[in-house]
Image: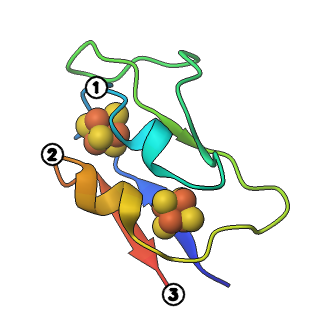
């Protein structure tokens, strides 16, 4: 099953990846703060909708998203 991982310590919370996901699986929840003082995005996919399309990872300027297929 495809999935992604957000490298939370590399994420600066710019949110470019949020609208990039066609299934709305990357959310800006502001539930935790990383060591750089940013709110990292969260991957929320309870129904396994991720297709591994990589759109979220490609748009990330900080290479903070890993895609597993
Ligand atoms: S790989 Fe595609 S479907 Fe999966 S979270 Fe990223 S943008 Fe969404
Ligand atoms: S595009 Fe990258 S740095 Fe920006 S919020 Fe998404 S994962 Fe974080």
Residue 42, image x, y percentages: 54, 38
- Nearer to the camera, 67 or 56: 56
Residue shown at 52%/25% (left/top)?
A: 28
Circle 2/circle 1 CB separation < 8 Å: yes
Instruction: Inspect this view and state whether residue 10 appears.
Output: yes
Q: Counting other residues with Cα less than 10 Å from the Cα at mark 3, is it few (<14), some (14-19), or many (20 or more)?
A: few
Q: Counting other residues with Cα less than 10 Å from the Cα at mark 1, is it few (<14), some (14-19), or many (20 or more)?
A: some
What is the quadrant of the N terminus in the image?
A: bottom right
For marks 2 and 3, the one nearer the N-term is: 2
Q: Quadrant of ligand 2?
A: top left
- What residue is pinned by disc 1? 14
Vertically, is 7 above or below 19? below
| Label 1 within 8 A of ligand 2 by Cβ | yes
- What residue is pinned by disc 2? 62
Vertically, is 15 above or below 3? above
- What residue is pinned by disc 3? 69
Residue shown at 34%/23% (left/top)?
A: 34
Q: CA distance from mark 2 to mark 1?
A: 10 Å
Residue 27, image x, y percentages: 57, 34
Residue 49, image x, y percentages: 74, 67
Vertically, is 2 above or below 47? below
Assign a secondary structure to mark 1: loop
């Amino acid at each position: 099953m495809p999935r992604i991982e957000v490298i939370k310590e590399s994420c600066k919370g710019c949110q470019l990846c949020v609208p990039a996901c066609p299934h709305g699986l990357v959310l800006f929840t502001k539930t935790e703060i990383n060591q750089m003082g940013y709110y990292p995005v969260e991957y929320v996919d309870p129904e396994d909708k991720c297709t591994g399309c990589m759109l979220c990872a490609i748009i990330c300027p900080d290479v903070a998203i890993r895609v597993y297929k």
